[in-house]
Amino acid sequence: MEKCSTGVDGLDILTDGGYPCGRSTLVFGGPGTGKTLLAMQGLAASASEGEGGIFVSFEEDPDDIIRNFGSFRWNLAEHVASGKITAVDARLCPGTAISGGFEIEGLLGILAARLTESGATRLVLDGIDILLALEPGKQDGIRQLLAVERFIRDHKLTALITLKSDEVGAGMAIAPYIGDCVISLDRRMENDISVSTLELVKYRGTPTPGVRLPVAIDERGIALLYEGARMVEHKVFNDRLSSGVARLDTMLGGGYYRGTTVLVSGSPGTAKTTLSAATVDAACKAGETALMVSFDEASAQIVRNARSVNIDLARHVEAGKLTMISLRAALAPAQMHIHHLCKVIEDTKPTVLVIDPVSSLIKGGGKSMVDSVVQLLVDYIKVRGITGILTALVDSDDPEHEVTLTHVSTIADTWLHLTFVAHGGERNRALTIIKSRGSAHSNQVRELVLSSDGLSLADVYTEGGVVLMGTARLEREAEAATVRSRDAYDIFTKRSGEAAAIEEAKARITALEAEVAGRTKALALLDELEAKVVEIGEERVDAVRRSRSADGAPKLVVPEARR
Amino acid sequence: MITLELFIAGTAANSSKALNNLKRALADLEIQVDLAVVDVLHEPKRAWESGVLVTPMLVRRAPAPTQMLLGSMDDVTQVAAFIGATT
């Protein structure tokens, strides 16, 4: 089936190309849901492509419509002036009396002539239910709608018919069956903020995703936040970005993977913003481009507060590496904020994005809407390989039961949770890594310490399975220091004793060696003496022998008889 | 002088009914009117320029102000009231 652009990027993706060409599309919606806007936007888009269209208004003065839509960037006035768009006032003159039934064939005849004359192939019948409601019989309304549908088919017009949704209940229930494509627009109040949505109810020959999508309105008209089922197109990286806290990087196995989404949840005052600022600071220092979006807190204040923990964000802003914007959450629905953000992202092209806190968006629409909007945002940044830091404010210390987080936490690749741990009359900040996809990460609860030197995670001291923090940790640290110094003293003492003993032993060795030397000397003298004694002894024997008239050497004379 | 224009869509049911009903009403009233019947399928431009898009539509051009009556005009009294100077 040939398709024609709707003039809304997201809707072109949703419808896999646009409205069915040469067929009718029905648009249902209550007051102020953007039916007329959607219809005129399509005409303006086709007029820009050189395709003419006729806009038949049954409800509003077409001149008013053109004037009101003049603020959109469609060059509507030019298209009307050049004849590409013809606006027709099909309202009944005020005071027109009604008597009996009427038929649509006259109108269709007039339109046919007009279409032939102008060569237009696009048609909008805006608020046709106003006219059909004047029919005395309900069936007549349907009959005329069928005639319109046949006319559109016969003339191969790409047509949009808008109807009020409440008319569906009032006898027009059959209407959605008539169009080849049916779109439902809705608007409801959530937390005093109007939330607009669009649903592709049916599309003959094209699968419908069956989701109600958030609608935003900007200077291009209706914007549908829909990127399609592009999950697989998320960019995946192997390099990591520092969290800005050295020990946290270690706990995460090296930091956050580029292109992943990090959820930092915590109750008020747990340093979610400061932790985000630390990441931004580290990223900017590493040459990344960052965008920091704050809800309900002025950028200047964040810069000042970060400075107190030795983080200089102003420097990065001046260097053009960091863009900081501050928004008031409750002033617009979530989808408008996100749509605005997507545009800022396009302009600034950051590689790191902080939304602080993403939970503020709930002020601009209910949970379900925020969930889908956050999902869209996460998809949007992941497709672009942007690392996202989303902070979330929780009111309890039990994040698992915090309903506002359930969806965001599912989407996030890494989830850090910050809490206050009350112990011994004080509250200390504790950081837990609840999950970190694809990283071997520490499961230990750590104390996050903010000081004028920056952010750090304190040393771990556990006691009875509890990680000690604050004063308890300091006490334990002091205690440990005491133990260490006592041990050191003992060792010193023992070491000194041993050293002295060695010296003593050495001295003894010297003395013994001296004794050995002395005695060796004495022994030598004795040997000498002994030799002398022997010598003297022999001399004496000789002398005796000589004195006894023996000569020569003394001889032992053995008597013969004894032989 | 009363000037009337009746815009019809060829032989469409309500248009035919309207033409018949109008003729009957005019006969009953026994007044002189200047009636022009415009078939929008033949003269779409005339209808377009008159701001008439839905048929059958009876337009009373004179006496001023211009008044319009939409429909098959089944209620003869209503039609008479619309045409006549009684309004």
Image: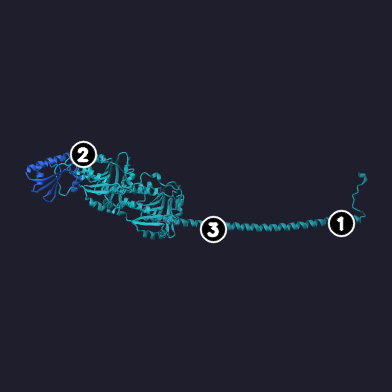
Chain colours: A cyan, B blue
Q: Quadrant of the C terminus of chain A?
A: top right
Cα–Cα span, label 2 and label 1: 169 Å
Residue type beneath disc 3: Tyr
Residue type beneath disc 2: Arg
Q: Which badge, 3 or 1, comes first in the chain's sequence?
A: 3
Q: Nearer the viewer, mark 2 or mark 1?
A: 2
| Mark 3 in CB contact with mark 1 (< 8 angstroms) | no
Q: Nearer the viewer, residue A335 or A43?
A: A43
| Mark 2 in CB contact with mark 1 (< 8 angstroms) | no
Residue occupying the point 74% across, 56% down: A520
Q: Nearer the viewer, residue A185 or A331?
A: A185
Chain assignment, label 2: A
Chain assignment, label 3: A
Question: Can you identify the residue that label 2 sits on?
Answer: A143
Residue type beneath disc 1: Glu
Q: Position of residue B36 (x, y in %)?
A: 13, 45
Q: Position of residue A158 (x, y in %)?
A: 28, 43
Looking at the rendered structure, the secondary structure element under dot 1 is: helix
Question: Can you identify the residue that label 3 sits on?
Answer: A489
